Amino acid sequence: MFETKIRDLGGRIGKLVTSHGVLETPFLFPVVDPMRQVPDLNTIKSIGFNGLITNAYLFYKRNNGFAKSIHRELSWSNVIMTDSGGYQILVYGDVDIDNKTIIAYEKSIGTDIAVILDIPTGSRMNYEEALKAVDETYKRGIEALPLIMDSDQLWVYPIQGAPYKELVIRSATRANKLPYDIYAIGSPTVMLEKYKYSKLVDLVLTARAYLSPSKPLHVFGVGHPMIIPFLVAAGGDLFDSASYILYARDGRYMVETGTKNIRDLTYFPCNCPVCSKYTPREVLELPGDKRTEVLAIHNLYVLVKEINTVKQAIKEGRLWELLEYKSKGHPALLEAFHVLKKHIKFIEKTSPLTNPGGRALLIYNSESYWNPKLRLNVKRSLEKTVSEFSGKTVVLIPAYRKPYVSQPEYAEIKRRIMEQEDLRIAFIHPFLGVIKPELTSTYPFYQHECRLTRDTLSVDKVAKFIEKLLEKNVKKIVIVESGWFTREVFLNLQKRLGEVSNKITICRLNEISSLSLQ
């Protein structure tokens, strides 16, 4: 039913098999309204969407409960997902249909992916009300099992409890024991509208930690490109939204870092078919319905572009680097990025250690320290290196030119100290830590790009690497004055190391001899 093809951070490219086709995740379902759909479904398909989501409850009401093939009614041969009426409960408080009835109806109309009738917690409920909603959703999830076990459809169990983290954990823990095909995070709409992206990312990561990694995770109501990369990195696989048409009706034009009012634009920062054909003024001069349609088409193109950008980043092992770039686009995204850093140990569990194809790791600044491909490799290298240096004198050569063993300091020092038994040579790098010579040709110690400047050089991080060596009872540390390691850096390092700084010294290359290392 679901197969993971490629992983990066908590995100993945996956294959979701349904009765009417295969979806490649991450995937976003456009929300469609059969009664007044703009643009038409053929256009949506041509843009790049082979799946859509509509509302089974509204379909039920409009057909007076009579079951019709939803694929035939929509003239759509690809994947259809249906919501059960949970959104109407969120907005209006209740619906005039019960869980068993809507489940039977979703089965009879032949939807591919169906949702039970949950009770969304939204943001208006107090804790006690939200607890009741979580418990009632669980009861309905149990109630649904005998009805759906013989179904060829994929069934979704919504994780409720937001914004209360402990209730999300309660809901996810219970959900993980039930044999549903897909899990979903419910009630994020208000968080999205108020740009509370950090809270949403936190909730997704919290739920993901208690759910089986073999099952895809849907995040309801997410339809803005700016937050999608962060939610994918947090473990989201599927999304849905009507934002493309809602924004268009309001004259709002999607860009990757937000939306712009069409009236405020002189130029289109896009080359999709809409933006290639019209100028902003020409769009404004279109009749109202036509203007809405062309804006909706543009918005769909932006969503497809963002999903494909995320997929390509995953394929190249560059999702973290994409997040670093995206986090500068809006303060709310920077907050979301910091939340990912708080959960980094969980994210590291599913993040690969290397880039496919040996692509270079890009190191920009202190945020790059948190990249799991950097953290995990540096940690492993440091642990392996320091365990061999106990009781030894260590000569550290500042790493500044790849491959580091080709730096003139390395050959000269080896010649001067003649491989004495109680001496060891290693390289030190502000981002890559302490590196044994034999590791300098491996990933990421060779396959990386980094520019060390005053702004990116962290003496604090260098001090932590040195402290790791000293914890293993290293006899003495001699750091060669070369490259980025200057006398000024050494003095700052001494201040940060405090009492243990008497075990380190700086030495020019021409001063190093066997005697000076005793």
Image (cartoon, rainbow, N blue to C red):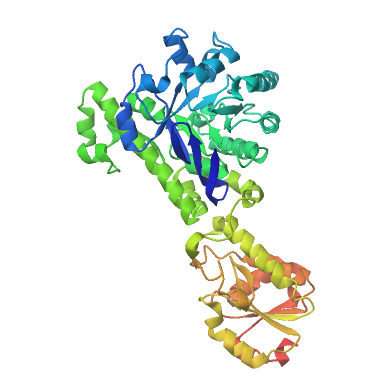
In the shown orientation, is residue 488 left or right of residue 70? right
Residue at 53%, 71% in the rendered image: 446
Q: Nearer the viewer, residue 71 or 64?
A: 71
Q: Quadrant of the C terminus?
A: bottom right
In the shown orientation, is residue 414 left or right of residue 322? right
Give the farthest residue toward the front: 150
> Can you see residue 78?
yes
Above or below, comparing residue 408 to residue 341 in the picture? below
Q: Nearer the viewer, residue 55 or 282?
A: 55
Above or below, comparing residue 18 to residue 452 in the picture? above
Q: Position of residue 403 (x, y in %)?
A: 52, 77
In the shown orientation, is residue 268 left or right of residue 403? left
Above or below, comparing residue 214 to residue 370 in the picture? above
Residue at 67%, 64% in the rendered image: 380
Q: Position of residue 219 (x, y in %)?
A: 53, 33
Q: Quadrant of the N terminus?
A: top right
Q: Position of residue 16 (x, y in %)?
A: 50, 38
Q: Nearer the viewer, residue 368 or 5?
A: 5
Marks counted in the figure total 0
Q: Position of residue 396 (x, y in %)?
A: 65, 78
> Can you see residue 495?
no
Above or below, comparing residue 95 to residue 183 in the picture? above
Residue at 74%, 75% in the rendered image: 388
Q: Nearer the viewer, residue 471 or 80?
A: 80
